[in-house]
Amino acid sequence: MRDTIIFAGGYGLPDRTASGIRVLGMATLFRRLGYQVLVLGKFEQAPTMDAAEHEKIIDDIPCRDIRQPLPGQVFRSYVVSAHPVIAAVDEIGALRVRAVLAYNYPARGAFALIRACQSRGIAPVLECADWYGWEGRKILRNLWRLTGVAVRMHILTRLAGNIICASSWLQNKLPGQHTLLLPWVIDITHPRWARAELEVPSIDRPVRFVYSGSPGVGLYKDRLPLMIEALTVLAREGHLFDCTIAGLTEAQYLAVVPQHRDCLREIGDQVRFLGRISHTESITLVRNADFSVFFRETNRMSSTGFPTKFVEATTLGVPVISNATSDIPRYLRDGVNGIMATGVSKRAVSEALRRAVNMSAAERGAMQVACRTDNPFGICHWAEPTKCFLDDLRGMHD
């Protein structure tokens, strides 16, 4: 009986990367559907070859390091080989494995893994949540990444035949393939997603904005400099607010955008930089905010994935201020459970933030209540379509 599904990828476990959190959410969903699961990712420290305990239980999910899935053996890198994943398959028993889900997998390794799965009657599944663009100045690295992702998206998706998409934009790019739209899935019963108590509406104070994440090379990913420029406009207009930025220090920010030194001086102590913090600290920061804020250009990279920041804030019952990228318009109702900027310009971002600072405590409270009414990323919303997808996997046979 093929009752086991293996997840494989280079994501950091348990929560060192957004992809690690996403995979554990999917693994929990698959378990709820009655499957056995094994997650192969990367622990903070790779286990030694002779480690006695090569498996860890994270959120009730058995996890191993993809670099050393079994003790006492030497493995080729998963980047270029199927060897480490197939070793785990053979240990479980190939006739028990229903599917191997390769998450944002390197092209060479994905090709080898697809072929190895097909030779064993196991359904290969590609999970495609990122379509990388050009980053930084390393030309050879960028060319290698761009070529790899192009091969994965245009060729390997068709070779695998089964694809999990994070956005409807990508799903529409794969006509004729067996696809599942799964932006994110969250186990809302987990203690980490406990929500802060709602404030008494009569309490009036400056609005609390938070940005927490990795702003990317050149601070381009979430348009953080644009947010700082918009906050400067609000400060000049005399608006009061409290903005916390986690993910980099002020010195790191100014090293990239030195021309914003005067902007930060004008904003003063209404903005503070925390530097890098743990995921647990990030969740606490967002939980106590009035709004989680980020903005992204509409391009292939932002259209392919779905923002972790939106999922986490929504799950914690915190409204989001953002613009219409990926499938955000499916879930953000402007003025009801968040604020939708009309574009990615200083004027549009300033207007969105201005709407927030002009809201009364009662209005903010009403928006939080609307945000808490239902979580569209809870497991219950995705169980049926996921079951149908897994029931009809291509390439599986005895």
Image (cartoon, helix red, strand yellow):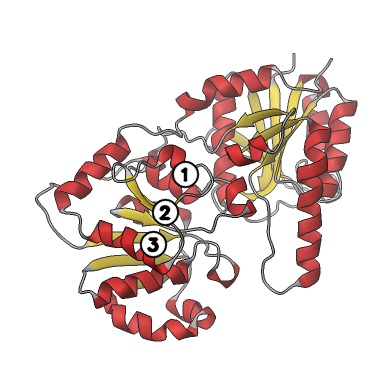
Task: Let me know if residue 166 appears in the view.
Answer: no
The residues tagged by marks 2 and 3 sit, at their Cα atoms, a distance apart of: 10 Å
- Residue 96 or residue 129, whichever sits in front: 129
Disc number placed over residue 75 in the picture, else none: none
In the rendered image, residue 17, in percent from the top left (x then y), is placed at 57, 52
Q: Nearer the viewer, mark 3 or mark 1?
A: 3
Is residue 207 shown above or below 149? below
Residue 51 image point, x, y percent: 73, 47
Look at the numbered discs 2 and 1 and tell me whether their residues touch, using CB distance below 8 Å.
Answer: yes
Note whether 376 is above or below 212 in the view shown: above
| Residue 319 image position (x, y, % from top left) | 33, 47
| Extreme residue in the left direction | 202
- Amino acid at pointer 1: Ile
From the image, state whether disc 2 or disc 3 is nearer to you. Answer: 3
Q: In the rendered view, does 230 fall on the left or right side of 70?
A: left
Q: Which residue is label 2 attached to?
A: 322
Residue type at mark 2 is Ser
Left or right, residue 83 beside residue 370: right
How would you rate the neighbour count of disc 3 (Cα within 10 Å): few for under 14, some for 14-19, many for 20 or more? some
Position of 27 with respect to 3 (left or right) is left
In what quadrant of the picture does the C terminus appear? top right
Decide which of tag 2 and tag 3 comes sooner along the chain: 2
> Label 1, on which residue?
328
The tag on residue 348 is 3
- Tell which circle, 2 or 1, labels the residue nearer the N-terminal end: 2
Instruction: State the SS at label 2.
Output: strand
